């Protein structure tokens, strides 16, 4: 009986606090995780899709507003932003070379000095070649230009065009007026980049000094930028910066090789066809190749027109074939081998980005649009990617080619 009474008291007594907490805690966790988002009475009367669309809409509007503010700041401070972007591209090109010399045992400042001097010598050599050939071939160019102009007028006077001299003069005057009117938009866009010689000189100085400091202490500069953000987001921003820098260096390296192949290939075609200014044609193609897709098309058209004007239709057709052959080689052989998965930008994004950049900033906007899109894509993907370890801070060291 005693044991039965104690057993009854044990079952009738209230459970201890410890056992109650153990039994209630899982129930509370399950309830919190399974409880749906609390809605107001008005939200309960609306379809779930409408509520979700409204929540997405105000977030998208916030992102668009922030993007508009960023574009406004870029337009306002374009005289600083454009040289900084140029410095980033040049530093991304030169940083791997500096890193190789430094790992070979050279002091870092000597490595930077050697690479900068070689880069300046290459630029000066290209300018000298262009000026030299234009100066030496100017008399022949003037003679052939006059003959080409006469042939073009004779062709337009005859069938099927039958254009009179008066109409032709009016057309030429209208074309000149349009080119003169739209030249500022073509060269500067909304930003009016490089409107005066003083602005060009100041921008060049900013780009040179920024390139030097990025090569000397790029890692420290990025570390200062990361420290501006909250501590709990610094790890993701560090990953994003490393991914963006890798993408930028890959993009610049690929574009340099593609530009060299395009320039040398089309320049050789012009040389073998006996066209005047073969070296300037090669340099124009090389520089235009830094604007993906659009630059190749425009430079190819210029080369074909020069062949048509100064050599005739047969040479123009041969030049067109050479241009197409070089671009096919670049698109189907070089791009897959060199780019791989390092720079992932869809061709439609390239075309739209170049068009938008041209409308905002003219030629500089077309030059910077695609690398900005590629870097932004890589940085966002790196920030959204889960870190490899939970609860551990990723090391802050950047890739070995990142300027230190």
Image (tube, grey):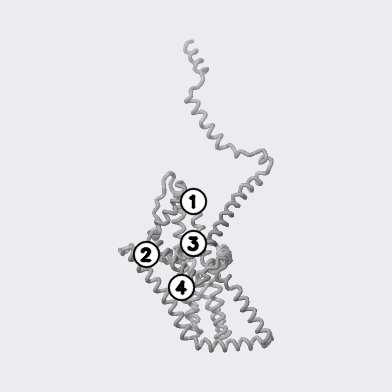
Label 4 to label 1: alpha-carbon separation: 35 Å
Q: On the image, numbered disc 4 is attached to which residue?
A: 260
* Count of numbered circles on the image: 4
> Disc 3, disc 1: CB below 8 Å?
no
Mark 2 lies on a secondary structure that is helix
Say which label, 3 or 1, has the lower sequence index.
Answer: 3
Say which label, 1 or 2, has the lower sequence index.
Answer: 2
Front label number (2 vs 3)? 2
> Disc 2, disc 3: CB below 8 Å?
no
Q: On the image, numbered disc 1 is attached to which residue?
A: 385
Hey, which quadrant is residue 183 in on the image?
bottom right
Dot 1, crowdedness within 10 Å: few (<14), some or many (≥20)?
A: few
Label 2 to label 3: alpha-carbon separation: 22 Å
**Image position of 146 with respect to 107: above or below:** below
**Image position of 298 with respect to 398: above or below:** below
> Disc 1, disc 2: CB below 8 Å?
no
Say which label, 2 or 4, has the lower sequence index.
Answer: 2
Dot 4, crowdedness within 10 Å: few (<14), some or many (≥20)?
A: some
| Residue 124 rendering spot, x and y as whole percentages | 42, 75
**Image position of 20 with respect to 2: above or below:** below
Mark 4 lies on a secondary structure that is helix
Label 1 to label 2: alpha-carbon separation: 30 Å
| Residue 289 rendering spot, x and y as whole percentages | 50, 71
Looking at the rendering, in which quadrant would you find the C terminus? bottom left
Q: On the image, numbered disc 3 is attached to which residue?
A: 343
Mark 1 lies on a secondary structure that is loop
Front label number (2 vs 4)? 2
Q: On the image, numbered disc 2 is attached to which residue?
A: 98
């Amino acid at each position: 009986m005693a044991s039965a009474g104690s057993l009854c008291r044990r079952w009738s007594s209230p459970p201890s606090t410890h056992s109650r907490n153990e039994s209630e805690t899982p129930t509370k966790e399950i309830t919190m995780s399974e409880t749906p988002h609390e809605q107001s009475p008005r939200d309960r009367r609306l379809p779930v899709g409408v509520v979700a669309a409204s929540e997405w809409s105000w977030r998208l509007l916030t992102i668009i507003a922030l993007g508009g503010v960023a574009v406004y700041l870029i337009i306002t401070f374009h005289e600083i932003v454009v040289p900084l972007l140029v410095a980033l591209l040049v530093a991304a090109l030169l940083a791997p070379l500096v890193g190789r010399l430094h790992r070979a045992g050279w002091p870092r400042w000597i490595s930077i000095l050697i690479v900068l001097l070689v880069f300046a010598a290459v630029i000066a050599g290209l300018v000298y070649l262009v000026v030299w050939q234009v100066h030496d071939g100017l008399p022949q160019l003037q003679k052939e230009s006059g003959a080409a102009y006469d042939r073009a007028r004779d062709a337009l006077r005859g069938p099927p065009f039958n254009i009179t001299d008066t109409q032709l003069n009016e057309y030429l005057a209208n074309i000149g007026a349009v080119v003169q009117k739209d030249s500022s938009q073509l060269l500067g866009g909304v930003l009016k980049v490089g409107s005066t010689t003083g602005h060009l000189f100041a921008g060049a100085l900013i780009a040179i000094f920024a390139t030097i400091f990025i090569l000397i202490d790029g890692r420290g500069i990025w570390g200062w930028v990361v420290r501006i953000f909250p501590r709990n987001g610094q790890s993701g921003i560090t990953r994003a910066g490393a991914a963006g820098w890798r993408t930028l260096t890959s993009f610049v390296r690929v574009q340099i090789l593609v530009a060299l192949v395009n320039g040398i290939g089309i320049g050789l075609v012009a040389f073998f066809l006996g066209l005047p200014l073969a070296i300037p044609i090669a340099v124009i193609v090389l520089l235009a190749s830094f604007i993906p897709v659009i630059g190749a098309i425009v430079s190819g058209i210029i080369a074909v027109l020069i062949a048509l004007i100064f050599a005739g239709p047969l040479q123009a057709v041969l030049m067109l074939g050479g241009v197409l052959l070089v671009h096919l080689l670049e698109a189907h052989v070089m791009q897959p081998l060199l780019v791989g998965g390092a720079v992932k930008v869809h061709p439609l994004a390239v075309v739209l980005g170049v068009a938008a950049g041209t409308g905002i900033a003219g030629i500089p906007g077309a030059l910077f649009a695609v690398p900005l899109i590629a870097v932004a894509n890589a940085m966002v993907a790196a920030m959204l990617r889960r870190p490899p370890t939970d609860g551990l801070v990723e090391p802050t060291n950047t890739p070995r080619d990142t300027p230190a």
